[in-house]
Each structure stands twice: as C-alpha cells, then as structure tokens.
Amino acid sequence: MIKIQSIHKSYGDVEILKGINLEVNNAEIVSIVGKSGAGKTTLLQIIGTLLKPDAGFVEINGTNVTSLNERDLSHFRNQKLGFVFQNHQLLPEFTAVENVMLPALICKNLSRKQCESRAKELLDFLNLGHRLNHKPDQMSGGEQQRVAVARALVNSPEVILADEPSGNLDTHNKQDLHNLFFELRDKFKQTFVIVTHDMGLAQMSDRSITMQDGMIVK
C-alpha cells in the first residue's frame, strides 16, 4: 500500500530525515512514536504529499506521488488521502455538515445534494446526527474531532494520516477516538498512519514505529 524509500529531508543545514525506509500494508494501523524533533511530523507530511523530500520517493497504492506535478498531486491528495490534525482545523463559520462536505465539493465527483447526503451519513455513523447544523464553537472538543474524522472520510480515501489526533482530548474522548480508528478500519478497510505521543494508542496499533534523530530505530 505505502512504500517509502530512502527519504531525506533537510531545512538549511539541519537534516531532519536521514534515509527513511518503511512499508505499510493495506488496512494496517501503524503508529509512529518518538520524542519531539525526531522527524515524525515531517515524515507524515511527506507521506501526505504536503512536503516534498530532498531525495527518495513515496509510493501509495502503486503511484509514485513524489513524481506527480502540482495539479495531479492536488487531485491525488483530495481523492486518495484523508487528514486528521490535533487542532481539528474546522472552519468556524461553517456547520458540521458544511465542514464535512468541503473536500467532496472540491472533488466535484458528486452533486451538492449528494455531498450533503454523504456528510450526513458519516456524521450519523459517528453519532453526531444531533450536531449536523452546529458550528465548531457549539460542540465539545471530542465532537469537533469526530467532525474532523468525518471530513477525512468523506471522499472514501485509501489512507488516513493523523498527526497527534487525540493530543487535545480528555481521557474519555481520547479512548473513544482511538477505538473509532479501529472501527473505521474494520468497516472501510482503510490504512492508517498515526503520529502520536500516546503510548496507549501505539500499543493498540497493528504496528508501532519508533523514530529518533530522523531515523527509524525500531
């Protein structure tokens, strides 16, 4: 599913990633752990095509994404990848349904009515049917994060990439979110790559990768 070969990334004279090699299987949940500054988020952003590596390549389901031009890359990112961030990144002026619909509207594969129906279906599945028309500031942190998960799922991506997704949640909501990832994997057969400091989530994962000083150490 995901093949990462000899990835290097530097910022000025500082080498952040030092020849990363990694393979992730289809429908596998992989956690990436390590101390701050180990290169975890940089690696995740390269997998997600948000950053380009200085050397090496990333292949996702047979497509070498590092060789795509910006137009094709944007299309690939919108249709094949879903993102969940620590701070939700929901648009405050939009309702839950509108936030979830956005990637589908950009994709343009569905009519607006179909996008809305898909968004409502996902929010109902995530037990947010009573929050469809609520804006982010009218929802709890856990509810906002589930809206963000629904947004990541709306285009039925092959891969979900999550960066500290439960970092701002309390213990109860954190566990609910972790359980949700496994429920989603079992239902939709998607692949998850999750950067986390939460060792509970790492231990739940199918596999945990530890990074240190820009390298995978185990």
Image (cartoon, rainbow, N blue to C red):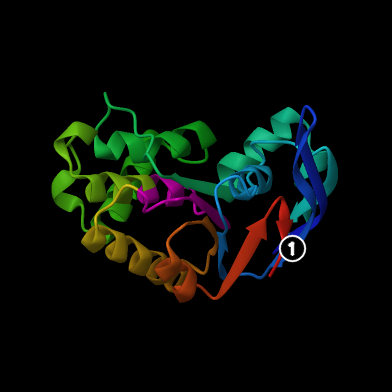
Q: Is residue 208 left or right of residue 142?
A: right
Q: How many marks?
A: 1
Residue 102: x %, y % from top left = 41, 34
The stretch drawn in magenta includes residue 151: yes
Q: Residue at x 61, y 48 (%)?
A: 44
Query: Can residue 2 be seen at all in this image of the molecule?
Result: yes
- Relative vertical location of residue 202 with respect to residue 35 in this rendering, above or below: below
Pick whichever, 128 or 24, lies toward us.
24
* Residue 133, percent from left and from top: 18, 37
Instruction: Find disc 1 in the rendering and name its residue.
Output: 22
Q: Residues within 10 Å of mark 1 (few under 14, many from 20)?
A: few
Q: Quadrant of the N terminus?
A: bottom right
Q: Residue at x 55, y 47 (%)?
A: 36
Q: Is residue 108 visible?
A: no
- Residue under the image location 26 percent in, 39 percent down: 96
Q: Is residue 98 above or below residue 128?
A: above
User: Residue 165 at what x, y percent from top left?
Assistant: 41, 51
- What residue span does the magenta drawing correspond to? 149-167
Q: Please state the horizontal and vertical placement of residue 181, each as a whole percent of the image.
A: 41, 64
Q: Nearer the viewer, residue 18 or 157?
A: 18
Residue 119 against residue 195 in the figure, above or below:
above
